[in-house]
Image: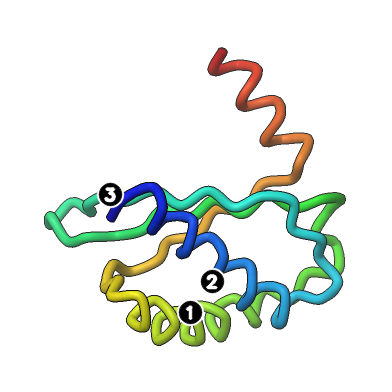
Amino acid sequence: MRNQDMKKVADLVRDVFRAEFDKVEIVGINAIQDKDRDGDSILRIEVVFKGDLKNFDASKLSGATRRLIPRLSEIDESAFPLFSFLSQKEAKGMRFEAA
């Protein structure tokens, strides 16, 4: 997939997560194509949120993944999504360290 397509992936993730996690403010989504150990295509999706996840219902995560997969197939993306969640503060710290 091209970068333009990764933006589509990020937009789909934002839509699905906005519906599932209405109390969590998402401030950024980064999607990267990758391969797992077996060579299968995966999408590494980093979700950056504002605040903390004190009230986060982790059981909703699997439901969000199930809802995202059909949406990904609508844009011809068959890679399995793997999520990472970072607070905005953590994400800034990581960018600083990488610079």
Depth check, mark 2 against mark 3: the one in front is 2
The foreground one among 71 and 37 is 71
Residue name at image x 63 percent, y 67 percent: 14
Q: Is residue 85 left or right of residue 23?
A: left
**Secondary structure under the numbered disc 3 in the rendered image:** strand
Report the quarter where the C terminus lies: top right
CA neighbours of label 1 inside 10 A, class few (<14), some (14 to 19), many (20+): many
Label of residue 34 in the image: 3
The foreground one among 55 and 64 is 64
Label 2 vs label 3: CA separation? 18 Å
Figure label count: 3
Q: Are marks 2 and 1 in contact (CB under 8 Å)?
A: yes
**Position of 9 relative to 96 (above/below):** below
Label 2 vs label 1: CA separation? 7 Å
Residue name at image x 33 percent, y 69 percent: 80
Q: Are marks 2 and 3 in contact (CB under 8 Å)?
A: no
Residue that badge 1 annotates: 68
Residue that badge 2 annotates: 12
Q: Give coordinates of residue 40: x percent, y percent.
A: 17, 61
The foreground one among 58 and 91 is 91
**Position of 23 relative to 2 (above/below):** below
Q: Amino acid at mark 2?
A: Leu
**Secondary structure under the numbered disc 2 in the rendered image:** helix
Label of residue 98 in the image: none
Q: Give coordinates of residue 29: x percent, y percent.
A: 59, 52
Residue name at image x 50 percent, y 59 percent: 83
